[in-house]
Image: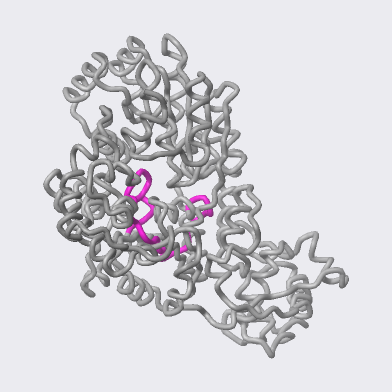
Amino acid sequence: MDKFDILKKYFGYSGFREGQENLIDSILHGQDVLGIMPTGAGKSICYQIPALLLPGITLVISPLISLMKDQVQTLNQAGIHAAYINSSLSESQISKALRLAAAGQYKIIYVAPERLETYEFLRFARQSEISMVTVDEAHCISQWGQDFRPSYLKIVRFVEQLERRPIISAFTATATENVKEDIVCVLGLRSPQVLVTGFDRKNLYFAVETPRRKDDYVLGYINEHDAESGIVYCATRKNVEKLCDRLLAEGVAVTKYHAGLSGEERRKNQEDFIYDKSPVMVATNAFGMGIDKSNVRYVIHYNMPQSLENYYQEAGRAGRDGERAECILLYSAQDVMINRFLLENKEQNGDYTPEEQDAVAQRDADRLRTMTYYCMTADCLREYILHYFGESGAGACGNCGNCMKEYVTSDVTDTAVKIITGIVEVRQRYGLNVIAGMLAGENRAKLQEYGVSAYKAFGSLAGMQETEIKQVVNQMLVENLLVTTGDKYALLKITEQTDEVLQGERRVFLKRAKSSPGQKNMAGREKKGSGMRKSDILNSRGLALFEQLRGLRTQIAREENIPPYIIFTDKTLVDMCVKLPFSRADMMKVSGVGENKYARYGERFLSAIEEYTGGIREKFYFGEL
């Protein structure tokens, strides 16, 4: 068999996605590779297909037990023999798995980085033909990445101890230029084929909202999307508990996940989410890496994350099936203070020198500042994200909250000059709240304590609300006309570019939304973006058939005790409703149906379609596809 035969037989696809074939060919020619591909772009196929064509065993280094279990279940369902080695197995189970692997039972073995240095595993690897070592979530090896895991450094030592150096392939969804260079250098990739397919997830809709009552917003959103699965991320365990309790009280099928729960409770709650018993998950960022659930239709961030890397990785857990999904960030100024506190109290790495620790702290502060500006900008959110990761977009995307809003642009240069003058007069010693209160002429006890009424700038913007002044300051921060210090005080400072405003060489403009879109206007964007909901594709008869097939999928999942999406994804069920297969040949043309999947489930789905349609091929979809 060649790569195309394997793609169709095991995975049910008739063609490769962007970048996949390039990386597969490079591996098959013995070349190291680094693939930086967005979530849902099909990274796993890039190493799974070569693993089946190369002569020996492929080891996949993976960071989380849940990820390994998911991947191995999916491969076994497709008819590919795979195994995993991690701490969830007993020593006797690990020994048995290694014996079977040595006997040629498995072509792909997922392994936790911590196992690489154990005597038994190293002996197995040195005595076996290891054709390729694949490093999944490769950004974890970079000390400057958002998810550095010291255990990943064991990979380098492990490869050095093998009798023959295998091909090294590395994959990640998010990596800045610095992290990309780190991966290549630390892993010791030799003349690698580096492929960056782009960071843009066109099926994702991004928005920043500033509701006064976040709990009410989340509840309203979930009620409007009650048939869908989603994740709500909170910054703290306390917020997770509070929000989960509120949703449970309102009758939402919700569960929770954070590090304060017992291991057994986390495992059960995670499985309830994956198996769609509780389609809504409220969690801290301890949840998510390695979760391969394809039908997550929304990710809401109750609090602003600490970095754009974290945000894009977490938001990217929506829409892994390529169908349209929404990523909503609920911002409040308090989020900045919470994150500063969390960063200041972050556990320090004992391996870092004081200089390195200072560099990490500065990097964290810079990332938090960039994340804050994302929440403040009135420009295209997708463009902002792509620019951060080193890509230039095509301007306004037409599929984000900012692009969907109507704005009025006003010249606020005179206000900016008074803000600068006030900051300079107080010798750059105060933060945003004090500066805004002073310029507005407020007389609060805190301002009296600082004695700001003695300055000439006091009340110079008395005709403006403090919130309006803060909007202009935030715009100046985004344009680097002002900066804040990285400490907890966040003092406002001028920059080299500030003089351009004072000297009349630069104007400052502020875009203000005419009105907040709110939840009621969400329907207005239903046709935007490249991804489409099933309701955009299927008519009422098609949607009814989809629900029948989804019910059958749930029934089979319970019989076999596996997640429903491992049987068939929502995208595959929609394709069945469009193509209405009545025979094996018809079913094999459905995207995502391979030979093994058909052998296991095909007849039951054909019977369900036959029963629903009476064998008559109607048109169950809108328009031309």
The residue positioned 62% from the left and 70% from the top of the image is 378
Say if the magenta span includes residue 192.
no
Span of residues in magenta? 283-310
Q: Is residue 511 left or right of residue 311?
A: right
The residue positioned 44% from the left and 56% from the top of the image is 315
The residue positioned 31% from the left and 22% from the top of the image is 107
For the residue pair 171 and 18, the one nearer the viewer reads as 18
From the top left corner, tell me how far across and down residue 625 is, in percent.
43, 57
Against 41, residue 108 (above or below) is: above
Farthest residue, direction left = 559
Against 519, residue 31 (above or below) is: above
> Which quarter of the rendering shows the N terminus?
top left
From the top left corner, tell me how far across and down residue 160 is, in percent.
46, 15
How many discs mark residues in the rendered view?
0
Q: Is residue 88 left or right of residue 432?
A: left
For the residue pair 160 and 424, the one nearer the viewer reads as 160
